[in-house]
Image (spheres, rainbow, N blue to C red):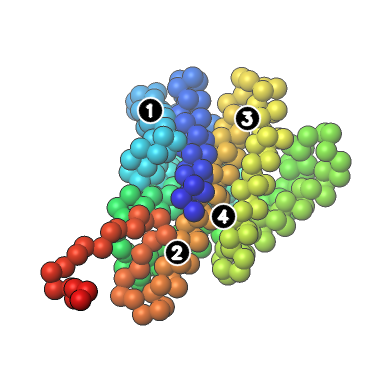
Amino acid sequence: MIQQHRLGSAFFGAGMVGFGLLSLIRRDDIPAIAPLPAGLPGRAVIAMLVAVVLVATGGALIANWRAARAASALGAVLAVWLVALHLPKVVANPKNGGAWVVFWEVMAMGVAAWMIARATSAREDGATTHASRTTLDATGLRIAFGLSFVAFGISHFVYVGYVVAVIPAWIPARTFFAYATGVAHIAAGCSLLTRVQERMATALLSVMFGSWVLVLHIPRALASPGSGAEWSSLFVALTMCGGAVAARSFLMANSAERVVSSSGSSATVSMFSRPKRARSSRHEEQPR
């Protein structure tokens, strides 16, 4: 469980480091994901500061150093991006499908960051958590994560021509795979929303995004090394792969906590927490 969580955190962190380095190299904002308004005062300085934060926090996740704080910081950054940069776009132009896709991408990455933060905090503290609060938080994160994938799947049907265009030409039946991956997204999202086979859904999501990193995005980025959009898409896929792995371990831990809670315990122990050695008491009965 812990190894799976660390692997997901590392992949997620690598994607964030990639975003930060991309911004630093371009000396500009991150294409599509964090587009700063052209007339924003101090735009270049803000872009560089955000890039440094992404590199630092992503590196902390990779190194597993103060990972809970790093993931919380990333969750806060992504929440600001969502509310300040993307929500106004979809409200102003609700028929813009591209804006909605990016909105849900940032939403999913932000949710994954908070899942990593919660799970890592439980592991680092080694403390018990109150069952009702844990369940409430996990439910909200799970629902937001599931809705994101339902939205991704719908976009595959609405914009099937674009999806077919980005699939490598050497892959046969590209239209079939465009629809099939749309169905896979929707099925995974529904699984998360209903809690039916949610672990399998997140495992398959991580495999799907991981395969896209290798088969689709790395070749496209290398073929167009000057394209910030291609590199940004690569880092989105890498981040989503890590986020799905981390989400699986987070949901497994939350399921275990619910089981402990339902057995009558007043507090739940996270599967990520380190067991503590019981303290001896002078009032304990001594063996005769």
Q: Can you give x and y, in whole percent of width and height, for residue 18 in the image?
A: 51, 30
Say which label, 2 or 3, has the lower sequence index.
3
- Element class at badge 2: helix
Residue that label 1 marks: 52
Mark nearest the camera among 2 and 3 is: 2
Q: Which circle marks residue 148 in the picture?
A: 4
Q: CA distance from mark 4 to mark 1?
A: 27 Å
Contact, mark 4 vs mark 1 (Cβ under 8 Å): no
Contact, mark 2 vs mark 1 (Cβ under 8 Å): no
The residue at 60%/40% (across/down) is 237
Q: CA distance from mark 4 to mark 3?
A: 21 Å
Say which label, 2 or 1, has the lower sequence index.
1
Say which label, 2 or 4, has the lower sequence index.
4
Query: Position of 118 compared to 201: left or right?
Result: left
Mark 2 burial class by Cα count in 10 Å: few <14, some 14-19, many 20+ = many
Residue 238 appears in the picture as rendered? yes
Say which label, 4 or 1, has the lower sequence index.
1
Q: Is residue 233 above or below residue 246?
A: above
Residue that label 2 marks: 254
Q: Which circle marks residue 194 in the picture?
A: none
- Element class at badge 3: helix
Residue 280, by quadrant, is bottom left
Mark nearest the camera among 4 and 1 is: 1
Q: Can you give x and y, in whole percent of width and height, for residue 154 in the image?
A: 67, 56
Residue that label 3 marks: 230
- Element class at badge 1: helix
Q: CA distance from mark 2 to mark 3?
A: 36 Å
- Foreground residue among 47 and 208: 208
Q: Can you give x and y, in whole percent of width and height, for residue 276 in the image?
A: 29, 58
